[in-house]
């Protein structure tokens, strides 16, 4: 089978590999679509992965083979699968910090989704593999995992209906969050450098941020400022926009710089700093329901589809913001 593997020169190139062998309780998946995520791009750019790594975790496909003992799936089923599985029992899981669970960090697909086939381990079969409802395409279903992450961010935000949130950065994550916060009846304000993305957010009910707009809110600032992109300098500026007692929510690896951060402002104004890194199996089920019931629109987020051979091109185009979201079709 063909895979797109990370090379010593920092590029992803096509290799031929043997088909994964599955054991009892496992599934072999024929990948049909895999979304290209910003974390994939970051790992490639920072060269933080071993040579030979196959990335891709926003996966949808068709079951090609079923291992002994599997009862809930059969060959030909259309499914999506997420790449990490929390144990559900450790200290972190009991506190709902699922992405800090040791098992969560250790589990993964074999290989990643930028391959023609992958093995779904038994833990994933029982916890993070979901059937795709009729009427949903593989491309739409590949958004289940990022939507789940965004749903977890919404829930961790613990905002009330009518509360205000400023979303900084309107990539696919920022635009998914725009739709979700609007669904839960929050006031959504957005900012980005790209007009087409701001227009899409406006279409989904968001208000464009402008300097001073936060002072016109009843609380004198936003209840929460959420960053899906940025750097330390931008993080410091959020302190001017969030209300006393409000929240700063990090949903991104911020670019590294040496900008000072006013921690005393957090203390004196009793601000909360929240972060969301990933999702849980329950979030995946909720995300699939949002897709199935058309509570969220992902079709407008797909900029272009690429064959596996053009994965490197897709990475370069997303990095340069020539496209917002690339889907690899196999």
Image (cartoon, grey):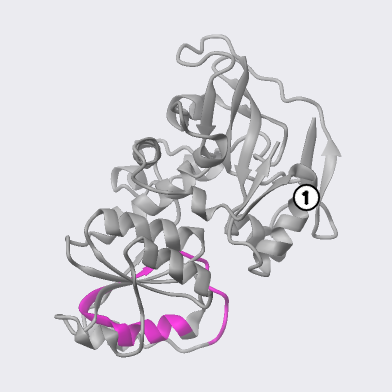
Residue 169 placement, left or right of 272 = right
Residue 210 can be seen, yes or no = yes
* Residue sitting at the far left: 218
Q: Is residue 146 magenta?
A: no
Residue 11 placement, left or right of 154 = right
Residue underneath mark 1: 310
**Residue at image coords 43%, 80%:** 235
**Residue at image coords 32%, 88%:** 240
Q: Quadrant of the N terminus?
A: top right
What secondary structure is found at the residue carrying circle 1?
Answer: helix
Q: Is residue 256 magenta?
A: yes
* Vertical comparison of 318 with 26: above or below: below
When asked about the image quadrant of residue 256, the answer is: bottom right
Q: Position of residue 228 (x, y in %)?
A: 46, 67
Residue 243 placement, left or right of 256 = left
**Residue at image coords 58%, 43%:** 57
Callout 1 crowding tier (Cα within 10 Å): few <14, some 14–19, many ≥20: some
Residue 156 can be seen, yes or no = no
When asked about the image quadrant of residue 133, the answer is: top left
* Vertical comparison of 263 with 125: above or below: below
**Residue at image coords 21%, 58%:** 185
Q: Quadrant of the C terminus?
A: top right
Q: Position of residue 4 (x, y in %)?
A: 77, 44
Q: Position of residue 42 (x, y in %)?
A: 64, 62
Q: Position of residue 75 (x, y in %)?
A: 59, 14
Residue 241 placement, left or right of 17 = left
Question: What range is drawn magenta here?
Answer: 234-258
């Amino acid at each position: 089978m063909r895979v797109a593997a990370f090379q010593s020169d920092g590029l992803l190139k096509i290799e031929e590999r043997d088909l994964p062998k599955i054991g009892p309780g496992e599934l072999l998946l024929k990948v049909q679509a895999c979304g290209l995520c910003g974390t994939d791009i970051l790992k490639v750019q920072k060269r933080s992965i071993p040579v030979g790594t196959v990335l891709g975790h926003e996966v949808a496909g068709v079951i090609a083979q079923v291992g002994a003992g599997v009862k809930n799936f059969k060959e030909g089923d259309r499914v999506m699968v997420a790449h990490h599985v929390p144990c559900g029992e450790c200290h972190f899981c009991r506190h709902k910090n699922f992405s800090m669970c040791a098992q969560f960090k250790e589990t993964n697909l074999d290989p990643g989704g930028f391959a023609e086939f992958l093995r779904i381990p038994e833990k994933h079969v029982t916890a993070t593999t979901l059937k795709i409802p009729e009427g949903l395409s593989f491309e739409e279903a590949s958004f289940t995992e990022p939507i789940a992450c965004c749903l977890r961010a919404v829930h961790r935000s613990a905002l009330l209906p009518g509360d205000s949130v400023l979303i900084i950065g309107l990539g696919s994550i920022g635009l998914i969050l725009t739709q979700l916060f609007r669904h839960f009846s929050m006031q959504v304000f957005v900012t980005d450098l790209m007009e087409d993305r701001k227009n899409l957010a406006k279409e989904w009910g968001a208000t464009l941020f402008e300097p001073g707009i936060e002072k016109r809110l009843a609380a004198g600032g936003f209840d929460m400022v959420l960053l899906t992109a940025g750097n330390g300098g931008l993080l410091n500026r959020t302190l001017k926009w969030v209300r006393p007692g409000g929240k700063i929510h990090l949903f991104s690896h911020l670019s590294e710089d040496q900008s000072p951060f006013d921690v005393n402002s957090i203390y004196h104004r009793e601000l909360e700093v929240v972060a969301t890194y990933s999702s849980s199996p329950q979030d995946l089920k909720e995300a699939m329901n949002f897709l199935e019931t058309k509570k969220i629109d992902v079709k407008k987020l797909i900029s272009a589809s690429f064959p596996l051979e053009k994965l490197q091109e897709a990475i370069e185009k997303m990095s340069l913001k020539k496209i917002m979201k690339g889907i690899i079709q196999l």
